[in-house]
Image: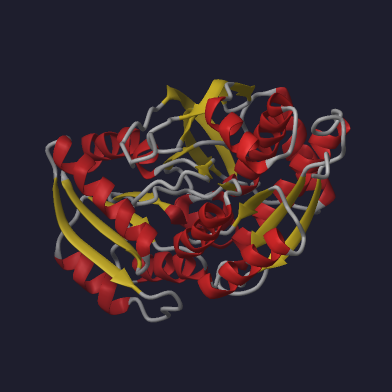
Amino acid sequence: MDPSLKIGLIVPLTGPVSAAGQALRNGFENGVRKVNQSGGANGHDVTYVVADDGGDPATSTQLARKLIQQDRVSILFGTITGDTAEAVGKVADDSHIPFATAILGDPDRCRPYAWTFGESTRQLLTPAVPSLMAEHGKRVAIVGSDYNFPHSYAKAAREQTEAAGGTVVAEEYSPLGQTDWQPVVTRLAAARPDVLLSMVVGSDAVSFTQQAQQFGLLTPALGFDGAPLDADYYPALGPLTQGRTHVVRWTDQLNHPDSSAFAADYQSRYRWTQPVPEVAGNAYFAVQFLAAAVNQAGKTEPEAVNRQIGTLRFDSALGTATHFDPGNHILQANMLEATIQPGGLYAVTRSLGLVPDATPKGCA
């Protein structure tokens, strides 16, 4: 096998979640540059092939097979939505090729070759839900896009709400591409929630949040957290999110030399004037983790690399000795509470330390 590390990046550069896909690609490419400037993986530059899946699971499947069989990649990386991640994960398992994601995620089951670098729902909700309920009240509503991940998010949100003594008073889902949110907003408002948790994603996150404010649901008195508060959406939703707190894995305001250098390079290279999306930061640090696993394995053979990913303890801006839980393949790393300030500054107002998620998924 070629001693150099070749990664296949599957990412939606077109379609409804293309903005997040482009941010992931940018963060990934910055990560590759960082690794190569530091000596590469096993002394060789990391190379990669980019493939646009448009956010479609069938396309993701075809591209994953092509990258493995024709391009001979050692690792698969990417996708944005949960259904495309599941599609690529199946191909990775069948081919015994490691597959890494950088998205917020909490898969229903663990695949032996899939590794989740993005924060899990429980790592987000464990600190966020009790804090929101203490400040705003115990009646919680949940809204999401209608595919597998938002449903998983809602399950974890119900668990956290009930554990903190609250009640889920409404739960709504709509397919991707929804434009008229008034009926959904009306039903949510009728439930009189104190807190709203949203996992509406992509361009829908913008239209839902704007209409939630337009039709009187989203007021300063309502506790609000979820995907629309991610940095990706600040350019469109800034005035509606400013002053709110948001639990994150990473923000470009994190005070760490590597993090600060990455954020500055991202803004300069891509002429970016908005907050750097979290998925870009996750991808940037994930590439460094994967390269370290290859160095530890001493070769790029996929089975050997997969074993080392599962045992590596890696220091970065995300924490000391970050690692994967063997039972669920979720990265165990620090979490932060950020307050959204004018100009898109996601200022770190509280370090939450390592927020573990050892929910068993059948990996061990």
Residue 262 left/right relative to 230: right
Viewer-nearest residue: 321 or 1: 1
The part of the image, by quadrant, that contains residue 132 is top left
Q: Who's the residue at 40% across and 27% down the image?
A: 355
In this rendering, the answer to whether 262 lies above or below 241 is above
User: Would you say residue 137 is visible in this rendering?
Assistant: no
Residue 187 left/right relative to 174: left
Question: Quadrant where the C terminus lies?
Answer: top left
Viewer-nearest residue: 227 or 89: 89
Whole-percent x and y of residue 16? 55, 72
User: Would you say residue 85 is visible in this rendering?
Assistant: yes
Residue at the extreme front: 1
Whole-percent x and y of residue 71? 77, 60
Whole-percent x and y of residue 201? 46, 63
Q: Who's the residue at 58% across and 45% down the image?
A: 278
Question: Quadrant where the N terminus lies?
Answer: top right
Q: Who's the residue at 16% across and 43% down the image?
A: 138
Viewer-nearest residue: 178 or 3: 3
Q: What colour scheme has been applied to the protein in the rendered image?
A: secondary structure
Residue 317 left/right relative to 123: right
In this rendering, the answer to whether 91 lies above or below 344 is below
Whole-percent x and y of residue 259? 69, 31
The number of callouts visible is 0
Q: Who's the residue at 83% across and 44% down the image?
A: 2
